[in-house]
Image (spheres, rainbow, N blue to C red):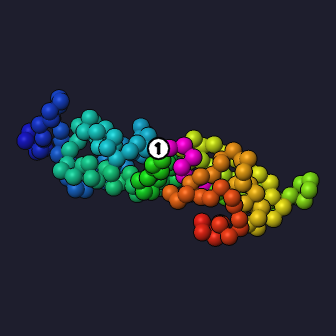
């Protein structure tokens, strides 16, 4: 204590003036939004106030809460680009073991009145196969996975798949 003012010893230099409860809001507003204010984050605001020479026990918490309530910071701040939950990788160590199959359509008619497409993606290699379809019935899809296709489908969901395909086979695999 020097004179009528209370000071706190600082670890990096000058003594810090201990601020009364009445002056906290004034200091936060002036440093954050005032002439030299740059609408910085909560921790940076607390460090800046400390460097100026002020101190109070809840400085970091008060600065963080003040920045969270600042309208300009909320409107102009950068958006979070992180997922809301942790991402779960698809573990697939073997090529052509797990595939994603999608039916796309109804598309504008092409030659031969083709309006749909079947898209198959291998999760490991990211290999994509696309074939146009007239209809999305099981016979057309069987033709896509039949002999002579790039995939040469042997396994689906860990089960062996017969080499000769019939529409009845697709019901087993929910296609």
Question: Which residue shows up at 28% across the image and 39% down it?
Answer: 47
- Magenta-drawn stretch contains 3: no
Q: Which residue is mark 1?
A: 93
Image coords of residue 163 (percent x, y):
65, 55
Q: Position of residue 136 (x, y in %)?
A: 76, 65
Q: Nearer the viewer, residue 68 or 147?
A: 147
Q: How many marks are shown on the rendered structure? A: 1
Q: Quadrant of the N terminus?
A: top left
At 69% from the left and 61% from the top, the residue drawn is: 165
- Residue in front for this viewpoint, 91 or 72: 91
Residue 41: quarter of image: top left
Where is residue 152? Give x, y as percent: 65, 48
Image location (x, y in percent) of residue 120? 66, 52
Q: Is residue 22 visible?
A: yes
Q: Which residues are magenta?
A: 94-100
Q: Residues within 10 Å of mark 1 (few under 14, many from 20)?
A: few
Relative placement, left or right, of 138 versus 154 is right
Residue 99 magenta: yes
- The quarter holding residue 46 reads top left
Check the image and name the residue furthest to the top: 13
Q: Provide the major secondary structure of the magenta segment.
A: loop
Front one among 149 and 70:
149
Q: Secondary structure at mark 1?
A: loop
Q: Is residue 22 left or right of residue 32?
A: left
In the displayed structure, does residue 144 sit left or right of residue 5? right
Q: Please state, as top left, top right, bottom left or bottom right, where the C terminus lies in the image.
A: bottom right
């Amino acid at each position: 204590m020097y004179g009528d003012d209370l000071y706190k010893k600082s670890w990096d230099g000058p003594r810090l003036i201990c601020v009364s409860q009445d002056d906290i809001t004034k200091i936060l507003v002036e440093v954050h939004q005032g002439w030299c204010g740059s609408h910085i984050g909560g921790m940076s605001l607390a460090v800046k106030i400390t460097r100026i020479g002020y101190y109070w026990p809840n400085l970091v918490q008060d600065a963080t809460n003040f920045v969270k309530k600042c309208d300009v910071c909320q409107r102009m701040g950068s958006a979070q680009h992180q997922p809301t939950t942790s991402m779960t990788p698809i573990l697939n160590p073997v090529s052509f073991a797990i595939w994603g199959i999608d039916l796309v359509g109804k598309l504008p008619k092409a030659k031969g009145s083709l309006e749909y497409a079947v898209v198959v993606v291998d999760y490991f290699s990211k290999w994509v196969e696309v074939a146009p379809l007239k209809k999305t019935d099981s016979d057309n899809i069987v033709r896509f996975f039949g002999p002579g296709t790039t995939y040469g489908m042997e396994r689906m969901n860990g089960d062996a798949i017969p080499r000769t395909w019939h529409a009845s086979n697709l019901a087993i695999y929910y296609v």
